[in-house]
Image: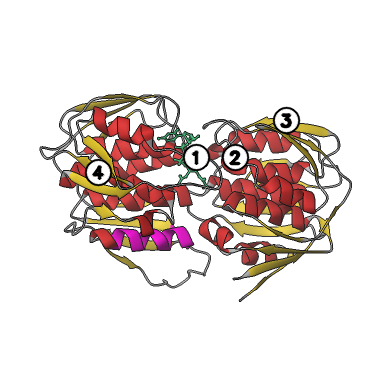
Amino acid sequence: MDRIRLRGGAPLEGTIPISGAKNAALPLMIASLLTDETLTLENVPRLRDVQQLFHILSNHGVDWSVEGKRAGQDGMSGQTIHLCARAIVDTTAPYELVSTMRASFWVIGPLVARMGVARVSLPGGCAIGTRPVDFFIQGLQQLGAEIEIDQGYAIAKAPNGLKGGRVDLPRVSVGATHTLMMAASLAKGETLITNAAREPEITDLAACLTAMGAKIEGAGTPEIVIQGVDRLSGARHRVLPDRIETGTYAMAVAMTGGDVTLDHARADLLSAPLSILEEAGAEITNTNRGIRVRRNGAGIRAVDVTTEPFPGFPTDLQAQFMALMTRARGTCRITETIFENRFMHVQELARLGAKIHLDGQVATVEGVDQLRGAPVMATDLRASVSLVIAGLAAEGETMINRVYHLDRGFERLEDKLGRCGADIERISG
Ligand code: EPU
């Protein structure tokens, strides 16, 4: 298994190109199941999760291809992919595939909407929390599907097609909103989703579905109204920039000091974390290329943070922010409200010398003057990258094991940081 070795201390200076968003690319790829025409997606990141989803979609009969490089493109440009589900050859998503990536459960929506049947493995446990799928099941039932759970599979049936209905989500769920929006696009009649997720990735999926012929209003607000249509067509859509990758590198710069432009980044996708970073002492400016992040001279200030659904501070940046706070002057409280077990990084940060006290969903972080490198590992991707941020500011060598988690969600991380002066390398094997 690959490892990443880094030596802390160097400020980051230069430019980091921000990739297309993983958490938009995945539902967009799944939307290809809704049509027998070709869906073309631009700016798709080169990630393990994307590769895995190709594999899962192939099993349902989706033909896919990746466009070759064009003149003037470098290895950092996003890829353009074509997906065509001319015929769905298999409506089962087996355990072996779904258990490797939870988001693949979302195929249940398009499959039952288009084919009248879907048999999708329940995803099972997860490192960051229990992550049940009850909202998906209740929501699809509201759209007329009959659902039974048998031998670890959710079996959804709607032999005469789905019917529009009202779905009141008990709490905000990104995945349930994506799935119900896709399913309702091919249902007969009108669907109302209340307490819908407002994440930019929802708005991106709605834009793509609209380009495919769906009739959706209110995406980006808590109430989404969908008028079902008989069929959807192919479309071409560009994946929006990854706000979590943007926030991660912004925190890395706040940690090491320096001056980095995050190319293609959009500040409107992460206003809450950027203003928290400003409070913590980073200088942030919008430029015509993206976002410029600087921290010179001044130290890092401790700031309290609570994770919330969009537009609040995202849970996917909680671990990275905690890494930053380990070097702050003073003490802060970081409260996780989305997942009940998303603190796997705490013990690993402690191995680098961080002082963190965990009490239920609240971590109290007391900043220290110096972190010291050590071998560390993590069990999910955001926790892994928080160790990279800590390692960039630690004295001596940090070795990150299980890099495979990082490869799920960060495209060429070591190249992007290395180009900005970080002493970082991947050790294969
Ligand atoms: N929930 C339920 N029942 C359900 C669905 C969700 O109780 O049927 C709960 C979850 O257990 C959680 C909360 O609702 O406590 C919110 O979960 P949500 O459904 O919004 O999460 P998700 O759709 O599974 C996506 C992202 C996650 C991100 C969360 C929250 C993708 C592929 N995944 O997950 O991203 O943390 O939204 O913003 O979009 C990551 O990229 O590292 C990652 C984990």
N-terminal label among 1 and 2:
1
Tell me the amino acid under the disc marked 2: Asn
Please give the name of the residue rendered at 40% of the width and 48% of the height, measured from the top-left corner: 123
**Measured along the vertical axis of the image, is residue 139 above or below residue 414?**
above
Secondary structure state at the residue bearing disc 3: loop
For disc 3, the marked residue is 304
Asked which quadrant contains residue 226, the reply is top left
Q: Secondary structure at mark 2?
A: loop
Tell me which residue sits at (46%, 36%) in the image. Answer: 199
- Looking at the rendering, in which quadrant would you find the C terminus? bottom right
Please tell me how crowded label 3 is: few (under 14), some (14-19), or many (20+) other residues with Cα within 10 Å.
some
Left or right, 142 with respect to 71, comes to left
Q: Earlier in the sequence, mark 2 or mark 4?
A: 4
Along the polypeptide, which appears first: circle 2 or circle 3? Answer: 3
The quadrant where residue 204 appears: top left
Q: Magenta segment, which residues?
A: 44-58
Mark 1 in CB contact with mark 2 (< 8 angstroms): yes
Q: Position of residue 300 (x, y in %)?
A: 81, 41
Q: CA distance from mark 3 to mark 4?
A: 44 Å
Mark 1 lies on residue: 130
Res 393 seen here = yes
Label 4: which residue?
Answer: 155
Looking at the rendered image, the quarter that the N terminus falls into is bottom right
262 or 361, nearer to the observer: 361
